[in-house]
Image: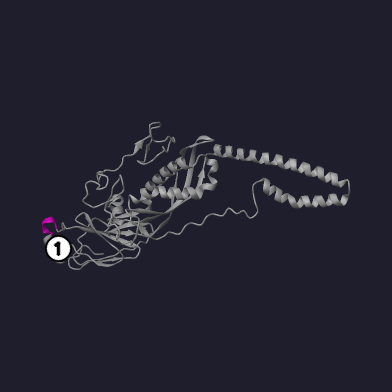
Amino acid sequence: MGTDNVVFLEVLEWFDDTGKELVHRLPEKGSGEIKWGAQLTVRENQAAVFFYQGRALDAFPAGRHTLKTANIPILTKILSTPWGMTSPLRAEVYFVNLKVFTNLKWGTRDPVAFKDSELGLIRLRAFGVLNLQVVQPVLFINSLVGTQGKYTTEEIEEYLNRVVVSRFNDYMGETIDSVLNLPAKYDELSEGLAARLKDDFSRFGLGLDHLYINAITPPPEVQKAIDDRSRMGVFQDMNKLMQMKAAMAMEKAAEGESGAGAGMGMGTGLGLMMPAMFAQFFGGTAGGGGGSVPPRAPSGDLACQECGQAIAPDARFCPYCGHQQLVFQRCAECGKNLPPTAKFCPRCGHPADQDKAPWTCAKCGSENLPDALFCNQCGEKHES
C-alpha cells in the first residue's frame, strides 16, 4: 500500500503471515490519505471495514472494491497546505480475519470456590480449549479493537479466559451437586457452558465455535478423600466376593468327597468363571466402552438474532423481519443491534453507551463480572 504518494492510487490488501491476527489496519501507523478510486481486495476468509473521518462507514465482503472518499489525486497535497501538507480528510481500512481460531486455551489461574454437597466448600481448577471466530466485524472493532493497528488472539485471550472461568463457576453451581459426579458429565458441561457463553461473546461480535473441558481437578487433599471413598467401595465388594468364594469352596469340598475327578472339574470351571465374577463385582463389563462423543459439526448457518431465521453471512438486513445485521454497537442490557447514531435502545430504553457494572461480593469483597451468579473467590451466590 502507498498512502504517501501524490499521484498514484492505492491498492489495499492484507495477508496474515502469523496466523494469530484478528484485525490489521491499513495504514499500520495512524490514518492515511486514501484517494478516490483506490482499489480494495478482500480475500474469502476476510472482511474489510472502511473508516472515514473517524467513523465506520461500511463493511466489504470478499472481492475487489473501489473506494470513494473526498481525497482527489494530485490536488490532495495542494489542498492540505493549511494543515502542514497533511490532508484533514483521513481514512483507514481495517481487515478482519474471519477464519476459526482453534486451540485457544482457557483455565483457572487461581482455584474457584465450589460448594460441594458432600465434601463442603472446596476449590477447583479447570482447563480446556475453545475455538473462536469473528462474526460481526464492525461491532468487534468498535467494542474491543479501537484504534490499534494490530489485534491478535493473545490480546483477547486473557479477558475471554476470565469470562469463561466466571461462567464455568456459575454453571457448575447450578448443575453439579458434587465433584464425585463430574467424570460422567464432561460433555454435558462443555455444551452447557458454550451455550451460556454465547451472549457474552456475541456482545463483542464474536462467535464461540466449540468449547472443550479437558480436566476439572480438586486440590490434593480432596483427591485423597475421593480415593479413600473409592477404596471403601472396593472393600465392600471384596467382602461379598469372599463370601461367595467361601460358599464355592464348601461346595467343592463336598463334591470332592464323591470323586477327585469332579473336584478337578469344578476347579477348572472356577478358574474360567473368575474373570467374569471380578468384572461383575468391580463394575466393569467387557466391551462396555466409554468412548468419547464425537464433536458435532458446525451447521455453518448464520441466524438472525431477532427472528432466528437463517440468513446469508453478508446480509445487511434480515430478509424475514428486516432486523439490521451489520452491527455497529449492541445494547448492553438486552443485546439488540443498535444503529450507529442511537442514544438509547429502542427495545428496552437502556442508554446506548452505558455498560453493566461489575458487582462486589458482600462476603469476601471480590469483584466479579456483571452477570456472574456466584463469586469466584468464595462461591457465595449473588443476591441481585
Magenta residues (range): 80-84
Does the magenta portion include 54?
A: no
Give the residue drawn at x 71%, y 48%: 277
Q: How many marks?
A: 1
The residue wearing badge 1 is 76
Callout 1: SS? helix
Q: Is residue 327 above or below residue 65?
A: above
Mark 1 surroundings within 10 Å by alpha-carbon count, few (fewer than 14), some (14 through 19), many (20 or more): many
Magenta span contains residue 83: yes
The answer to whether residue 310 is left or right of residue 290 is left
Q: Position of residue 215 (x, y in %)?
A: 51, 47
Place residue 304 in its image quadrant. bottom left
Q: Is residue 148 visible?
A: no
Task: Specify the farthest residue to the top.
Answer: 363
Tag 1: amino acid: Thr
Q: Quadrant of the N terminus?
A: bottom left
